[in-house]
């Protein structure tokens, strides 16, 4: 009789426990969750800026992408993921790409109004296994390493961020990221080819930035690693650099190459990377972004909120007096001699003419 009286209690407990388990929140990957519309999106952290013709595009956390035609009024774009976004680039006024965490690659064909997902970390893992999983020469040490990297990538899931994107036109481009992750497309992102075997990066350093300079494409990474594209060999070859700190970005013109990174460090070359000179930037903060303006002025933005300007092709820099200071993650040129600065509090626009502020968003 005692057992008969206990049985209902156990049944109730089982039901309660089952209900408790069913009530637990279910994890949904940011890759499967569209960005949530928010009136505060422009005031959230913004990691990247780009110009799409006369339109300014801003990309940031939780899949937020916004666009503005006057640098003042912003509209949130439709984005199919809520992954944090790290870089955005428009090679034409209408065609653009954005990349971010979970290996996501997004594409827009309407100047940033709407976006579609072309690639993510799960698909990248499958591509890597297909490309490197069955080497023609299994005894080759590099082939073995690439095979192991591909297997590890697949095992760990879509956790590798993409950190930069660059397109030469609406068809040919690269995306790069953590642990030597690099892929190339020649059809506008419809298909992608892993390029890890085409980079002089045997220690799999994180690849942070790439940009054309001195007639080719340069790429920068951890521990002072600088690479440039050898178009004939179709390979990124190492460029000797007298600096071993992490580099975040590169900019330049037809002759100049300037790389920048941690603790205010920057170096420049006027001979395609054959020789380098150290640049005194006047800051000890990490330099997160830079650009070459239409008039040849160089601008560097620091993580402590400074904006540095050079009018002598990077030989010297001076600070720009700003009306408000906040950590900078990105800088982009806008109309009327102004720049947009993006960071933790969103986007603010600053005039470079007599340091007069245009507006703050």
Image: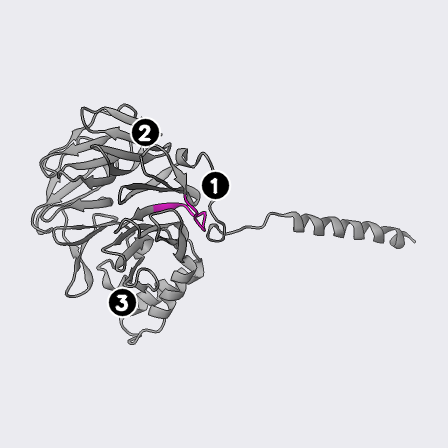
Sequence order check, earlier mark of 3 and 2: 3
Q: CA distance from mark 3 to mark 2?
A: 44 Å
Q: Nearer the viewer, residue 245 or 329?
A: 329
Helix, strand or loop at label 2? It is loop
Sequence order check, earlier mark of 1 and 2: 1
Q: In x, y percent, where is residue 64?
A: 41, 43
Q: Neighbour class for label 1 at 10 Å: few (<14), some, many (≥20)?
A: some
Disc 1 and disc 2 in contact, CB within 8 angstroms: no
Q: Nearer the viewer, residue 275 or 35?
A: 35
Q: Is residue 214 magenta?
A: no
- Circle 3 sits on which residue? 142
Residue at image position (33%, 28%) is 360
Decide whether the magenta segment is chiefly helix, strand or loop: loop
Residue at image position (32%, 73%) is 135
Q: In x, y percent, where is residue 88?
A: 32, 47
- Residue 37 is tagged as 1
- Circle 2 sits on which residue? 326
Q: CA distance from mark 1 to mark 2?
A: 25 Å
Tell me if I can see residue 203 in this picture: no
Q: Which region shows up in magenta? A: 77-86
Q: Neighbour class for label 2 at 10 Å: few (<14), some, many (≥20)?
A: some
Q: CA distance from mark 3 to mark 1?
A: 46 Å
Residue at image position (15%, 45%) is 252
User: Quadrant of the rendered structure where residue 185 is?
Assistant: bottom left
Q: Nearer the viewer, residue 219 or 354?
A: 354
């Amino acid at each position: 009789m005692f057992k008969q009286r206990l049985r209902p209690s156990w049944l109730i407990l089982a039901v309660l426990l089952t209900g408790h388990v069913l009530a637990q929140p279910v994890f949904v990957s940011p890759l499967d969750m569209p960005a949530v519309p928010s009136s505060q999106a422009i005031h959230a952290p913004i990691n990247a800026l780009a110009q799409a013709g006369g339109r300014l595009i801003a990309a940031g956390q939780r899949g937020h992408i916004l666009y503005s035609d006057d640098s003042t009024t912003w509209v949130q774009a439709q984005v199919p993921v809520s992954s944090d976004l790290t870089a955005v680039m428009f090679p034409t006024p209408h065609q653009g790409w954005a990349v971010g965490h979970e290996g996501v690659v997004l594409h827009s064909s309407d100047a940033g109004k709407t976006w579609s997902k072309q690639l993510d970390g799960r698909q990248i893992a499958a591509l890597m296994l297909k490309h490197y999983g069955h080497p023609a020469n299994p005894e080759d040490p590099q082939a073995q390493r690439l095979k192991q990297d591909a297997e590890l990538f697949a095992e760990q899931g879509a956790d590798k961020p993409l950190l930069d994107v660059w397109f030469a036109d609406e068809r040919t481009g690269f995306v790069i990221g953590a642990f030597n992750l690099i892929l190339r497309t020649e059809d506008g992102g419809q298909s992608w080819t892993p390029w890890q075997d085409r980079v002089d990066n045997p220690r799999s350093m994180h690849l942070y930035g790439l940009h054309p300079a001195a007639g080719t494409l340069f790429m920068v990474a951890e521990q002072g690693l600088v690479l440039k594209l050898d178009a004939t060999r179709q390979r990124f070859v190492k460029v000797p650099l007298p600096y071993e700190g992490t580099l975040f970005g590169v900019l330049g013109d037809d002759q100049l190459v300037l790389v920048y990174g941690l603790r205010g460090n920057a170096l420049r070359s006027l001979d395609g990377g054959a020789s380098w000179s150290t640049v005194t930037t006047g800051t000890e903060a990490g330099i997160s972004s830079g650009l070459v303006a239409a008039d040849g002025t160089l601008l560097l933005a620091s993580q402590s909120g400074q904006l540095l300007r050079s009018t002598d092709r990077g030989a010297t820099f001076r600070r720009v007096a700003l009306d408000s200071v906040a950590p900078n993650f990105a800088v982009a040129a806008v109309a009327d001699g102004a720049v947009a600065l993006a960071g933790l509090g969103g986007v603010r626009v600053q005039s470079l003419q007599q340091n007069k502020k245009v507006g703050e968003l």
